[in-house]
Structure formats: C-alpha cells, structure tokens
C-alpha cells in the first residue's frame, strides 16, 4: 500500500519528540482536542516509540463525505511526564494513507520506533491537515479519552506558535 521509499524517517525536534510532519504548519484552534498541522499529502511520523493500538479507517467522529478516513493510535513505551500526569498515547487522525494497516484488537501489535513513517496527511472538514492528539494516563476508552488541548500540545512539542513551520526533516 505505501507509495514511498522504505526507511523514510523524521528527526528529533529540540523537545526530544520526533517531528510528526516535516514542513507542516502549526494551525489549530483554541480548545481543539488535538493540534492541527496543515500540509497537503505530507509524510507523517511517529513522535516516539511504542506499539500500535490500531491503524485503520474509523476511530473519529469527525468524518464527512470527502474526508480521508485513517486514524492511528500508538501506546508509548515511555510515557512523557506532564505535570502530575503522563502522556501515554498518541492519536493521529484524518490520514490519507497508512504505512501499516492494523485493526484494533489484533495481536501482536505493530512495533513502531520514534521517527518511523506511519502514513500521509489527508483532508477533513475541507482542509488538508493532520490532527495530532496526546492522550493522558491511558484513558483512551472514548475515542480520545483524556487529552491535551491545542495550546498545551504546542507547548509540549517545543513552544511552537501558530503559523510556525516544523523543520524540514
Ligand atoms: Zn483538530
């Protein structure tokens, strides 16, 4: 299924996370349940290592007729401390392509290293973007569970401001 060269990877950002979408532009809106990173058909990468909970169509409530359908959730090997809580899972939505398909509940789960390519950005709500969610304390039952908001994610990723462009690799 993937149409890109094997072994494509992203580099670490100064925050220690791997770049989720090189050259993506930080956008988003206040109190969104994730960070929107704008870019048309951009490669999307794992920001840290872990195991894939699912990589398939569905898993979002925000799907319109023209939206691209794929979502990926990864359980991190090493939760990222966040105050007295921990970021335990990463959620990617609106992808147009996947590197590996994995239905929810399938075992063994796909292993993914930080910086591995997981897919390609897609479109939702009429705009090309990646929706990137950071989920807390393993609370993932209801699609998103407990999550950081848009401004909190920008801070954790490295104090990015709206309109900033992520590095090229
Ligand atoms: Zn969003």
Image (tube, helix red, strand yellow):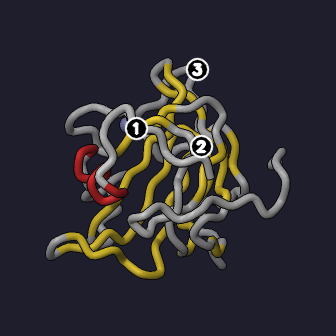
Q: Residue at 27%, 54% (x, y): give it.
A: 155
Q: Say which label, 2 or 1, has the lower sequence index.
A: 2
Residue 141 is at least partly visible in this image: no
Instruction: Quadrant for residue 60, please give it.
Output: top left
Contact between marks 2 and 1 (CB within 8 A): the answer is no
Q: Distance of mark 2 from mark 3, alpha carbons?
A: 13 Å
**Other-residue count near label 1 (Cα within 10 Å), few / some / many at <14 / 14–19 / ≥20:** some
- Between 165 and 3, the residue placed more toward the observer is 165
Above-or-below relation of 146 to 48: above
Contact between marks 2 and 3 (CB within 8 A): the answer is no
Q: Residue 63, percent across and down?
A: 48, 30
The circle on residue 66 is 3
Secondary structure category for the residue under label 1:
loop
**Other-residue count near label 2 (Cα within 10 Å), few / some / many at <14 / 14–19 / ≥20:** many
Q: Residue 159, percent across and down?
A: 29, 52
Residue under label 1, please give it: 164
- Foreground mark, 2 or 1, reads 1
- Between 142 and 96, the residue placed more toward the observer is 96
Contact between marks 3 and 1 (CB within 8 A): the answer is no
Secondary structure category for the residue under label 3:
loop
Q: Distance of mark 3 from mark 1, alpha carbons?
A: 27 Å
- Foreground mark, 3 or 1, reads 1
Q: Residue at 49%, 50% (x, y): give it.
A: 92
Q: Distance of mark 2 from mark 1, alpha carbons?
A: 25 Å
Q: Say which label, 3 or 1, has the lower sequence index.
A: 3
Q: Residue 50, percent across and down?
A: 53, 75
Residue under label 2, please give it: 70
């Amino acid at each position: 299924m993937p149409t890109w060269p094997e072994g494509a990877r992203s580099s670490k950002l100064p925050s220690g996370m791997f770049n989720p979408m090189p050259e993506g532009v930080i956008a988003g809106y206040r109190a969104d349940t994730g960070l929107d990173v704008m870019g048309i058909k951009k490669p999307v990468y794992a920001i840290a290592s872990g195991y894939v909970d699912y990589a398939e169509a569905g898993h979002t409530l925000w799907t319109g007729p023209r939206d691209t359908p794929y979502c990926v959730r990864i359980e991190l090997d090493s939760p990222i401390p966040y105050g007295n809580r921990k970021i335990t899972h990463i959620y990617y939505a609106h992808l147009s392509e996947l590197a590996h398909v994995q239905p929810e509940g399938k075992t063994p789960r796909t292993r993914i290293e930080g910086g591995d390519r997981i897919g390609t950005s897609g479109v939702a709500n009429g705009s090309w973007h990646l929706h990137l969610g950071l989920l807390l304390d393993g609370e993932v039952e209801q699609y998103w569970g407990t999550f950081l908001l848009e401004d909190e994610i920008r801070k954790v990723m490295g104090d990015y401001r709206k309109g900033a462009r992520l590095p090229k690799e």
